[in-house]
Image (cartoon, rainbow, N blue to C red):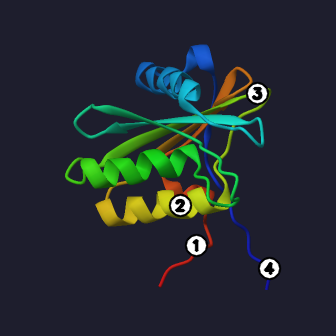
């Protein structure tokens, strides 16, 4: 039996994003300055908005002993959980340089975003930006519909 899966998402130009989302994309773009992409040459910045309104930044960091680097999304989410565990993540924006197209989380990051969402019991809005546009999903499950779960 064949089944079908549909994923709903929103598509915007950066200028037409809702104000809070546009601010978070600008923060993710600012986080690009903190990236250390010595080997790939691909910088990624991430910004999260916590329920309190506080915004945190993360950036990718690569290591000579690959794969010991970390993606921007995981760096900011692990920081948020370690330092602000009582303040849930409500939104996560991602930006990259170069940015000819939208930047999407890798598979490991998708799983971690979903893990954080499950632990905090609150959906995370994901804003994936680049190339002058952004795609938004309201819940991390949209990016990983067949998720791993113990």
Residue that label 3 marks: 98
Element type where label 3 sits in the image: loop
Task: Please rate how many residues cluster around mark 2, counting C-alpha atoms within 10 Å: few if below 14, some from 14 to 19, many from 20.
Answer: many
The x and y percentages for residue 146 are 62, 72
Vertical position of residue 143 compared to residue 96: above or below: below
Element type where label 2 sits in the image: helix
**Callouts 2 and 4 close, C-beta under 8 Å:** no
Residue 123 is labelled as none
Nearer the observer, 80 or 93? 80
The CA span between labels 1 and 4 is: 19 Å
Residue that label 1 marks: 147
Vertical position of residue 13 compared to residue 38: above or below: above
Element type where label 4 sits in the image: loop
The x and y percentages for residue 10 are 60, 37
The CA span between labels 3 and 4 is: 39 Å
Q: Horizontally, is 130 left or right of 73 in the view?
A: right
Vertical position of residue 129 compared to residue 63: above or below: above
Instruction: Identify the residue at image location x=74%, y=75%.
Output: 3
Q: Residue 51 lies in what quarter of the image?
A: top left
Query: Closer to us: mark 2 or mark 4?
Result: 2
**Callouts 2 and 1 close, C-beta under 8 Å:** yes
Query: Closer to us: mark 3 or mark 1?
Result: 3
The x and y percentages for residue 5 are 69, 65
Residue that label 4 marks: 2
Q: Horizontally, is 49 left or right of 62 in the view?
A: left
């Amino acid at each position: 039996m064949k089944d079908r899966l549909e994923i709903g998402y929103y598509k915007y130009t950066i200028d037409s994003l809702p104000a809070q989302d546009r601010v978070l994309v600008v923060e993710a773009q600012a986080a690009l300055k903190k990236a250390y992409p010595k080997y790939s040459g691909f910088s990624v910045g991430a910004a999260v908005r916590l329920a309190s309104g506080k915004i945190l930044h993360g950036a990718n960091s690569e290591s000579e002993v690959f794969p010991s680097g970390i993606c921007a999304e995981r760096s900011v989410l692990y920081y948020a959980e370690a330092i602000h565990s009582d303040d849930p993540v409500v939104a996560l924006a991602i930006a990259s340089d170069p940015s000819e197209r939208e930047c999407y989380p890798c598979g490991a990051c998708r799983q971690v975003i979903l893990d954080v969402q499950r632990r905090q019991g609150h959906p995370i809005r994901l804003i994936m930006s680049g190339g002058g546009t952004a795609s938004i999903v309201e819940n991390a499950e949209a990016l990983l519909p067949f998720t791993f779960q113990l």
